[in-house]
Image (cartoon, rainbow, N blue to C red):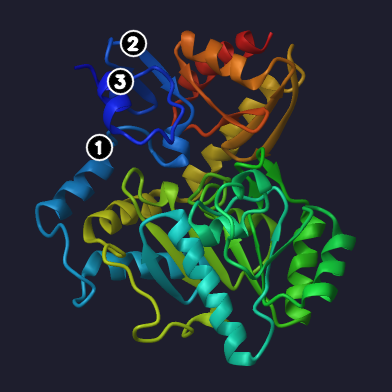
């Protein structure tokens, strides 16, 4: 029985997959079961930071895998500690809790905010933005400011309020109405259509949080780990968050989530207040250490150059209405339906995905310029 037929019999039907079975890959090139090659500009939805089968990453992961694949959090392991130290040194955050996904990292951030508020006797309401996306657990769905994700799963976890992105007046009014203990936001709303927050709006979040003893929680699950052209997207805005969550590209292809805790909440979790069986897994952490150590200024500068190439190539071209986003997380608003453009790209050997009504690009950070140019030519043709 072929893979697709077996899938239909045995796998829960939660995904609308393209009719392609990926069997191998190297760099930015994926290969399907028929031997057809594709330039992959999706990176497993921002996961494969350095593409497929990266030699350095494989060496780091394999070394750890053949030494110690797992032990429980009843014991210390060096990769977990090394990764936590790296993240803190590079961000100025103070402590890290490791989990397995972006949703779990965000759940941890929500728990930190609730506990911080409870300790002070403050409101435990968390303010998030309309059009946001924070995960698919019941609580992170509640944090997500899109009703389309809420239906069928009511009642959701209580304690969330929503305000429009980039509306300073509405944000100020929400603080007056809800007295939130935290504001949770993505500096680029990925699943919401690859829309960046405006600089002045983010600075207003910082101002209001400081004035009202509320926490700033930056969700860096998709834009983080070098994708923006800085190590984390919030760094473009000159702010100092209290909590930063990330996942996806951190592991380079292995499941890992991280919740970074700043000065005000560094000791919010005490013995027994949170946990994860696989959190801080040695193999996943070894992969992440390899990723983070390679995201140096030279690599981040390349991300900016590639971002500029994409924008300069596509903006103003036939069938392209706009290009939004930051770094190598970009959304293309097309005159044609986005799904039609995606299908045309796939036919011609380029993998792209959608975000609402836009075509979304999330290429490996180290994709060669010539390969990127070749893919852009296919995208331009598909948009015409």
Of residue 278 and residue 267, the one placed in the foreground of this image is: 278
Q: Residues within 10 Å of mark 1 (few under 14, many from 20)?
A: few
Inspect this view and state whether residue 92 appears: no
Please tell me which residue is depicted at 16% across the width and 55% down the height of the picture: 64
Q: Residues within 10 Å of mark 2 (few under 14, many from 20)?
A: few
Q: Which residue is mark 3?
A: 4
Question: Pointer 2 and pointer 1: residues touching (CB < 8 Å)?
Answer: no
Looking at the rendering, in which quadrant would you find the N terminus? Answer: top left
Please tell me which residue is depicted at 81% across the width and 53% down the height of the picture: 166
Q: Which residue is mark 2?
A: 36
Task: Name which of mark 2 and mark 1 comes first in the sequence.
Answer: 2
Q: Quadrant of residue 28?
A: top left
Of residue 338 and residue 318, the one placed in the foreground of this image is: 338
Measure the alpha-carbon separation of dots 3 and 1: 30 Å
Q: What percent of the width, then of the height, locates residue 76?
A: 21, 75
Inspect this view and state whether residue 61 appears: yes
Please tell me which residue is depicted at 41% across the width and 54% down the height of the picture: 101
Label 1, secondary structure: give it. Answer: helix
Report the mark closest to the observer, 3 or 1: 3
Outermost residue, right direction? Answer: 169
Question: Pointer 3 and pointer 2: residues touching (CB < 8 Å)?
Answer: no
Q: Which residue is mark 1?
A: 55
Establish if 184 lies above or below 370. below
Measure the alpha-carbon separation of dots 3 and 2: 17 Å
Establish if 240 lies above or below 197. below
From the viewer's perspective, is 121 left or right of 250? right
Outermost residue, bottom direction? Answer: 120
From the viewer's perspective, is 168 left or right of 129? right
Q: What percent of the width, then of the height, locates residue 361?
A: 56, 30
């Amino acid at each position: 029985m072929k893979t697709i037929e077996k899938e239909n019999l045995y796998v829960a039907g939660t995904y609308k997959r393209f009719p392609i079975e990926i069997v191998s890959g190297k760099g930015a090139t994926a290969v399907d079961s028929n031997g057809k090659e594709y330039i992959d500009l999706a990176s497993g939805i921002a996961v494969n930071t350095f593409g497929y089968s990266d030699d350095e990453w494989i060496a780091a992961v394999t070394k750890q895998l053949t030494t110690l694949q797992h032990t429980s959090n009843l014991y210390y392991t060096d990769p977990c500690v090394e990764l936590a130290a790296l993240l803190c040194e590079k961000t100025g955050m103070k402590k890290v809790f490791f989990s397995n996904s972006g949703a779990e990292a965000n759940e941890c951030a929500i728990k930190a905010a609730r506990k911080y508020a409870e300790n002070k006797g403050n409101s435990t309401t968390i303010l998030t933005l309309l059009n946001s996306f924070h995960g698919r657990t019941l609580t992170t769905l509640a944090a997500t400011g899109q009703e389309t994700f809420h239906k069928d799963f009511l009642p959701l976890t209580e304690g969330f309020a929503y305000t429009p992105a980039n509306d300073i007046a509405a944000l100020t009014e929400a603080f007056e109405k809800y007295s939130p203990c935290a504001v949770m936001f993505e500096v680029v709303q990925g699943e919401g259509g690859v829309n960046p927050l405006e600089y002045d709006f983010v600075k207003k979040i910082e101002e209001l949080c400081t004035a009202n003893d509320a926490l700033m929680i930056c969700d860096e699950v998709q834009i983080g780990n070098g994708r923006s052209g800085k190590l984390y997207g919030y760094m473009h805005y000159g702010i100092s968050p209290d909590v930063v969550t990330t996942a996806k590209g951190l592991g380079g292809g292995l499941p890992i989530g991280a919740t970074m805790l700043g000065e005000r909440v560094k000791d919010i979790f005490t013995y027994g207040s949170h946990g994860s069986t696989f959190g801080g897994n040695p193999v996943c952490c070894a992969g992440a250490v390899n990723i983070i150590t390679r995201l140096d200024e030279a690599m981040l500068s390349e991300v900016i150059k590639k971002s500029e190439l994409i924008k300069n190539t596509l903006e103003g071209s036939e069938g392209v209405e706009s290009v939004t986003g930051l770094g190598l997380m970009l959304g293309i608003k097309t005159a044609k339906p986005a799904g039609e453009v995606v299908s045309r790209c796939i036919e011609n050997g380029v993998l792209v995905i959608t975000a609402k009504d836009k075509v979304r690009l999330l290429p490996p950070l180290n994709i060669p310029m010539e390969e990127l140019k070749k893919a852009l030519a296919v995208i331009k043709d598909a948009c015409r």
